[in-house]
Amino acid sequence: MEASKQTMGATAQSAPTVQEAKEFLENAETEISEFGKFAAQTAWVKANFITQDTNALEARMAEQGAKLSTRLSKEAKRFNSLNLPADMRRKMNGLLRGSNFPAPDNPAAAKELAQIMTRLDSAYGTGTFEMNGKTLSLYEASDIIATSDDPAELQAVWEGWRTVSPSMKKDYASMVEIINEGAQELGFKDAGDLWRAGYDMDAEAFAEEANRLWGQVKPLYDELHCYVRAELNGKYGDEIVPLDEPIRADVLGNMWGQSWGNVYDDVAPEGGGKGVDVTELLVENDYDALKMVKTAEQFFTSMGFEPLPDTFYERSLITKPEDREVVCHASAWNIDAQDDVRIKMCTKVNGEDFSTVHHELGHNFYQRAYKDQSAFFHDGANDGFHEAIGDMIALSITPEYLVEIGLLDADAVPGEDADLALLMRQAMDKVAFLPFGLMVDQWRWKVFDGTYSPSEYNDGWWELREKYQGLKPPADRPTDAFDPGAKYHIPGNTPYMRYFLAHILQFQFHQAACEQAGFEGPLHRCSVYGNKEVGEKFNTMMEMGASKPWPDALEAFTGTREMDGSAILEYFAPVMTYLQEENKDRTCGW
């Protein structure tokens, strides 16, 4: 027996072989696949039934997942010196990075991390506040922010929602310490370094790449900011919207000031023609939430994709239940890494959610496209790809498309004189979002590397919001404020750079698709609805999943290996021309 132990010890210390690496990866893939389904089922139940019990179950699942990730990462280090085939090395590198929220190799730390992450997510999902004798949820508060013209009411609701997050701050700071320790054990400087390393390039090179892309599109955002500030000044006056300061974040129609479409009527170009009110069309045509989802599915099937399975409609959450708390934040799910795909969304019958369901189904069709890849590669080429797929489809929701599906009469299609109105409405969401998409993870990276200590979390948040977005809070914030926690992706621990990249990639995808379709008009009038040739080429990229570096996937569809913001500038060229003319006598900037 003693001799046997010695033999085993010698084997453990001996130089690893490629065959051992192969067997290790095969075993790891089996573990990952089995745990992945269990984890998805547990998280699904918790998101749809937020109770003390489901919180406990999710925390236990997260603890198990953290331990699995940490163990596999540690074991993968043994093969660092091996010269492995590219496919195996890519799998091994994925294991070495572990999760975005790695626990240290310490069972107590893994358990604490899981409990913290569950508490943070639930604090957001169940958050409410009192105003005028009523208890308001985010769902209700967002409606007020979207529709109210009363600055006092807007400020009260905006500040009210941010009372749900100060209690998260201590947990968040503890979580940062734990995942930084976990990242350092994996060989990274901190968790931010770990995150940036997931883009097939050096971590610092990726940070520079994000700034390069922002530099391409910033001039368009700056013109939009200048114009919107002036128009809102005309509505609210100098006291609420001064012309030489950042814009108050509560007057832009969105709880986080990340998209401005809800105040479009306040800034609509004069003489820009009448655009299409998709919300009005949906209501007039008796659409409900289910019909909106089926219409989005029809777009994908028109391009040659297989219909969604019956289980999608049997198991998805499409409207908000009246009998329980759920996480209403729209999301797409793949429970078994095969065909059990679902969405979870408190869908409202309006134009915004009509676009959102196209976006969420984009995730589902992407998930199905790469289902035959190794479990290691069940993901987007980079996380921006996943977010861009559905948004690219949503760019084809043109007036002509609305005619195709019977929502709009052919004789009601706006003429070219309405293009400016249609584009300005889109810019209020798409262009306005760009700096927010960039700054959320800029903030986290500075938290992870210690630039912002816990006492500086909130000031740092507003430092970046002013720098990138030119926004400010409606009044001085309390000393205990933790405003980052009022945005789902912070307590929900979802990396955010993916959304910035998606806003670059969706236009790049759209431009490539329209070129493939032979479309010769303005980019913003192109729809690829019904184009199976585009669908086939798009599917080729989607089927790759994460099996190749993202430049390979990008090249498969667009013919280029570099992300490029110029497609946004082409798409919104009429808006840029209009904004520059309107702003020529204004002092822009903040």
Image: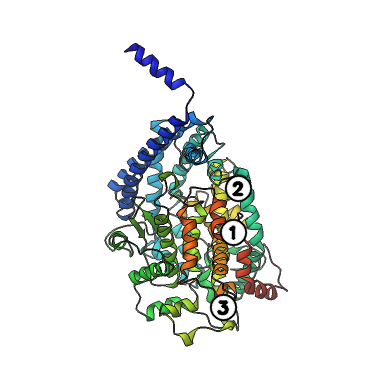
Check residue 559 in the rendering and tell me which mark sits there, or answer none: 1
The local secondary structure at tag 2 comes to: helix
Task: Determine whether 190 is above or below 435 in the image.
Answer: above
Which residue occupies the foreground of this view, 583 or 349? 349
Q: Is residue 276 visible?
A: yes
Q: Residue at x 46, y 50 (%)?
A: 494
Going from N to C along the chain, the mark reached first, 2 or 3, is 2
Q: CA distance from mark 2 to mark 1?
A: 21 Å
Amino acid carrying mark 2 in the image = Phe
Disc number placed over residue 206 in the picture, else none: 2
Mark in the foreground, 2 or 3: 2
Location of the N terminus (image quadrant): top left
The kind of residue tagged 3 is Ala
What residue is shown at x 54% (from left), y 56% (from top)? 556
Direction bottom: furthest residue: 411
Mark 1 belongs to which amino acid?
A: Gly
Pointer 3: what residue? 421
